[in-house]
Amino acid sequence: MEVRKDGGGESLPPSTRLHLAAAFFLPPRFTPARVRYDRRYRKLDQYRFIVWFLFLPLLVYLLFVVSPFLQAFFYSMTDWTGYSANYNFTGFENYERLWNDDKFWDAMVNSLVLVVLAPVITLALGLFIAFMLNAGGRRGRSQAVSGVFGTGFYKIVYFFPQVLSIAVVAVIWSRIYSPRSGILNEGLGSVGLDSWRQEDWLGGDLARWCVLAVLCWSFVGFYVVLFSAAMGSIPREIYEASLLDGAGRSVTFFRITFPLTWDTIRTGWIYMGIQALDSFALVNVMIPEHGMDVVPSYLFEKAFRDGQAGYATAIGVALFLVTLAFAVLMMLVGRRERIEF
Amino acid sequence: MSEQRPTAAGERSGGVLNVFAHSFLVLWVIMAAGPLIWVVISSLRPHSELISDPFGLPTSLEWDNFSNAWTNADIGRYTVNSLIILAGSLTGTMLLGSMAAYVLARFTFRGNRFIHLLFVGGMMFPVFLALVPLFFILNNFGLLNTRQGLIIVYIAYSLPFTTFFLVSFFRTLPTAVQEAATLDGASHSRTFFQIMMPMAQPGLISIGIFNFLGQWNQFVLPRVLNVGDPDDAVLPQGLAALMVQQGYEGDWGALYAGVTMAMLPVLVVYVTFQRQVQSGLTAGAVR
């Protein structure tokens, strides 16, 4: 389809051409009658609408999303500090430095721990709870599977952490982990596990496990709801058939529920991995300064505390590559035949 | 198990599993809601009691905590800041997002697929990659540390998913209505605002809730792009700052009161509209 806002034919008189061009920038109401009854008006009207409606969204998007992404790749090859407008092109020097930067690798290991473990733990808990909610009930006379009593209530409460700001979650948990007035140490003390009490949960080596726990805590409810919806769409007849064949609950789960919700599990897995790679807010709020880092928080420090904007964007590129590798890996590993039902 | 062979073993294993299932479900209720309830209870206790016995119930109700948090710690001001920014950014996101999505879903033109892919591709990139250049772009436009700047950035970073979601939604709507409107002489923009927008309402509500919570809870963008005057902080920033501040001043009661005030309205809205909120938020994972 050809864009013919100017009319298209060579034979058009200049005045008509001008009219058509002008109409392109006017709202329909002010379109001159001459143009309105031109046979090209329909096309013009359509393209005018398309351009006007796409203009603003595209402008905002290109200016504030696409352009910074592209610039990032360029700045990652400069020694830009961010304080002045001057910088030199340094090629792959930042990446070499990154390769030999122990603090970066510490942060990367922490991020990788999160991206590997957080989805496994969260999705396992989510699946287990969702299955209990949907099929944990007593098997009745007329139903092959039934939900437990109070499913609606459970789902409402489990979803609580998900609607809270991640900053609120981080503040609450850093109080829970607080060594003196926090309820974790207090709780361990009251059940007789005094030896498990820690002087400093968030400052030392335990920090990454503390962050992992909070990350999982805040997302389990989300996956319970997501998987419940997926399980709810599995036809009852399939469960009934398996029951007639003598399948127990665990067989039902592994042979029916799990394969039939696999698509949802896989997308959920990728989504959770991306959340885990993004866990900046938790670390930024909970962890004291010079404590544990994840890749985003290390980037943040380099860019906005140490004035190494160029190096920070190189870290950003590394983070992007890890995200991409994770997503591609999950797509390849998780691919199996789609089951229609 | 009663439908098949009703053996005693089968009955019992079902029963044991039931008890196990229920206790686990109840345990997770305590896990999920416990910390929140603890914060609400603690917000009513004076600081000295909080230090000596973090688990206790309030002996007398310390409403002072709330007035301290609201005025001294500026939670009130942060809430207003958040509301102002959200009013602009949510309106803008919904308007721009649905405009772009409608055009992409309903018109064929050269570059349609490319623009669609451009929007969808934006979901693949971690926001941290863009953060440093974005900071300086805003600085060059004079938008750094301003409300307008934050509003535009919120809109820009909500557009990929909003557009992606609404394109697939607009595609499901019947074309006949649109054609009827055109035959009746409605202009394209009139068809959009008076016919298609009302028809797309369920989709708009889902994505609206998604964006509402996402932008209300946004932490990274204001943490980087809104660091000028502490008075301009949005609510999540303000809470993080309050925690640091109360660490020095030693008034945990005010912190818990601040968290409670940030938390309870959202929870009340959520419980009221829980079905819509749950479907709106889980839409985010079904990419």
Image (spheres, coloured by chain):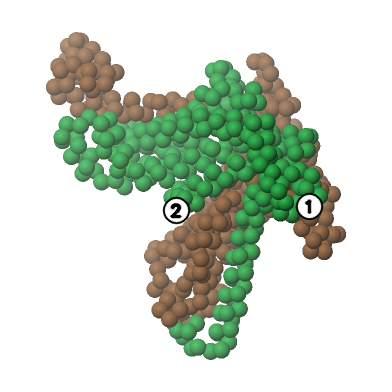
Chain colours: A brown, B green
Neighbour tally class for label 1: few under 14, some 14-19, many 20 plus, Cα within 10 Å: some
Taking the spot 59% from the left edge, 50% from the top edge, the residue there is: A161
Visible in this render: residue A314? no
Question: Dividing the picture into quarters, in which one does residue B25 lie?
Answer: bottom right
**Secondary element at image label 2:** helix
- Camera-near label (2 vs 1) is 1
Residue B98 is left or right of residue A95, and the answer is: left
The amino acid at mark 2 is Arg
**Residue B53, which numbered label?**
1
Q: Earlier in the sequence, mark 2 or mark 1?
A: 1
Taking the spot 64% from the left edge, 31% from the top edge, the residue there is: B71
Chain letter, disc 2 residue: B
Question: Dividing the picture into quarters, in which one does residue A78 lie?
Answer: top right
- Across and down, in percent, residue A40 comes to 18, 24
**Residue B275, which numbered label?**
2
- Number of marks: 2
Visible in this render: residue A341? yes
Q: CA distance from mark 2 to mark 1?
A: 38 Å
**Residue A106, which numbered label?**
none
- Across and down, in percent, residue A120 comes to 62, 57
The amino acid at mark 1 is Asp
**Secondary element at image label 1:** loop
Taking the spot 15% from the left edge, 24% from the top edge, the residue there is: A39
Q: Answer above or below: position of A270 versus B182.
A: below
Chain letter, disc 1 residue: B
In this view of the protein, which residue sits in the foreground, A33 or A214? A214
Taking the spot 59% from the left edge, 32% from the top edge, the residue there is: B76
